[in-house]
């Protein structure tokens, strides 16, 4: 059996991923703010390093795959800290450990929001690895009001998908035999969307922004199953991709523009 580290394991997509992996006989080390094997705050550099150290210790030094699901959608710069740096720092620190596995794999959760309008300046600051500057830009957007504050979320996911694309062919990942991919959900029924989807107005707004002609909103397990395939031994050559598992939202919104 394989050993997986799953972030965001206490809720939604991460919880579904951890549950399916365990059902299939794998060892799972969950990371989350609370209710996890490793309790850590991935919004902070110290929290990320402490989480990696503790998770690797619990794994006895042998980690086969990492699935990073932890994320938030607050209209504030903490969204950038968790969704981008909390994923990229975590994976970068774990890559040398993963490389020792005979079939190492990594996957992250992006979003169809990566295709929505965003702040290119903020995306660039993230991809430059400049967390201080990214948080400054994210805070300025938030200070302008909730509309611009929301840009923290699509910007974090655009940067994450681009980071996956760039990093997948680096010595640390391709060079070490590690496929690295993202899954981009449409609207998933989880704690993140519960409040929004609880009113007709909220649902109408979500569905206008994220049209899902195929099968509508998804359960977290739908996303979990693809994350699990991407990090299984069966996946040897799919890398650098953001796979839209979104009921047709990408096909609707982006059309031929690929
Ligand atoms: P969720 O709120 O159910 O789960 C997210 C988990 O991340 C929670 O357990 C939370 O405690 C954890 N987390 C948040 N901040 C953290 C921090 N600082 N340190 C450690 N853990 C932290 O939401 P979900 O829908 O399962 O979201 C999982 C991922 O899917 C996120 O990256 C989200 O952006 C993405 N996503 C969700 C949807 C959706 O519709 N729900 C759509 C597209 C993408």
Image (tube, rainbow, N blue to C red):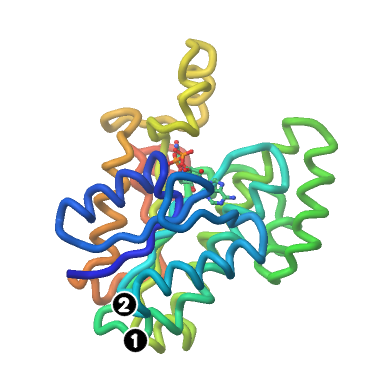
Please tell me in which quadrant of the rendered image residue 215 appears: top left
Asked if labels 2 and 1 touch by Cβ distance under 8 angstroms, the answer is: yes
Name the residue located 49 percent from the left edge and 33 percent from the top edge.
192
Would you identify the image quadrant in which residue 122 lies? bottom right
Q: Nearer the viewer, residue 135 or 58?
A: 58
For residue 104, the mark is: 2
Left or right of 102 in this view: 172: right
Residue 66 rendering spot, x and y as whole percentages:
38, 66
Residue 42 placement (x, y as % from top left): 58, 57
Q: Quadrant of the C terminus?
A: bottom left
Q: Nearer the viewer, mark 1 or mark 2?
A: 1
| Residue positioned 30% across, 44% down in the render | 16
Q: Which residue is mark 1?
A: 100
Residue located at (80% from left, 52% from top): 137
Residue 149 found in image quarter: top right
- Describe the element under mark 1 as helix, strand or loop: loop
Q: Is residue 206 above or below residue 178?
A: above
The answer to whether the beta carbon of the residue marked 1 is less than 8 Å from any atom of ligand 1 is no
Is the CB atom of the residue marked by disc 2 within 8 angstroms of ligand 1's nearest atom? no
Image mark for residue 235: none
Q: Is residue 173 left or right of residue 83?
A: left
| Residue 258 visible (yes or no) | no
Residue closest to the eye, 48 or 216: 48
Q: Dot 2: what SS?
A: loop
Residue 242, how many percent across, how many down? 41, 58
State the image coordinates of residue 211 (x, y, percent, origin top left).
42, 30
Q: Is residue 63 in sight in this rendering?
A: yes
Q: Mark 1 to mark 2: distance in Å?
A: 8 Å
Location of residue 178 with respect to 248 vertically, above or below: below
Point 70% across, 71% down: residue: 128
């Amino acid at each position: 059996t394989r050993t997986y580290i799953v972030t965001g394991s206490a809720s939604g997509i991460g919880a579904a991923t951890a549950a399916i992996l365990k059902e299939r006989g794998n060892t799972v080390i969950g990371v989350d703010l609370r209710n996890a094997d490793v309790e850590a705050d991935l919004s902070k550099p110290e929290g990320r390093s402490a989480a990696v150290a503790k998770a690797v210790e619990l794994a006895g030094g042998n980690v086969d795959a990492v699935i990073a699901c932890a994320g938030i959608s607050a209209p504030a710069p903490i969204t950038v800290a968790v969704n981008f740096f909390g994923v990229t720092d975590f994976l970068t620190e774990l890559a040398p450990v993963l490389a020792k596995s005979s079939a190492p794999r990594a996957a992250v959760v992006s979003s169809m929001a990566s295709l929505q309008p965003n702040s290119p300046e903020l995306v660039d600051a993230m991809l430059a690895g400049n967390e201080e500057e990214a948080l400054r830009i994210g805070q300025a957007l938030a200070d302008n009001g909730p509309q611009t504050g929301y840009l923290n979320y699509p910007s974090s996911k655009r940067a994450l998908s681009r980071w996956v694309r760039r990093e997948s062919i680096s010595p640390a990942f391709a060079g070490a035999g590690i496929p690295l991919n993202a899954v981009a959900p449409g609207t998933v029924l989880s704690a993140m969307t519960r409040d929004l989807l609880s009113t007709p107005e909220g649902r109408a707004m979500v569905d206008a922004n994220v049209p899902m002609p195929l099968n509508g909103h998804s359960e977290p397990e739908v996303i979990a199953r693809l994350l699990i395939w991407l990090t299984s031994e069966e996946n040897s050559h799919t890398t650098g991709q953001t796979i839209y598992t979104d009921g047709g939202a990408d096909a609707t919104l982006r059309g031929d523009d690929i």
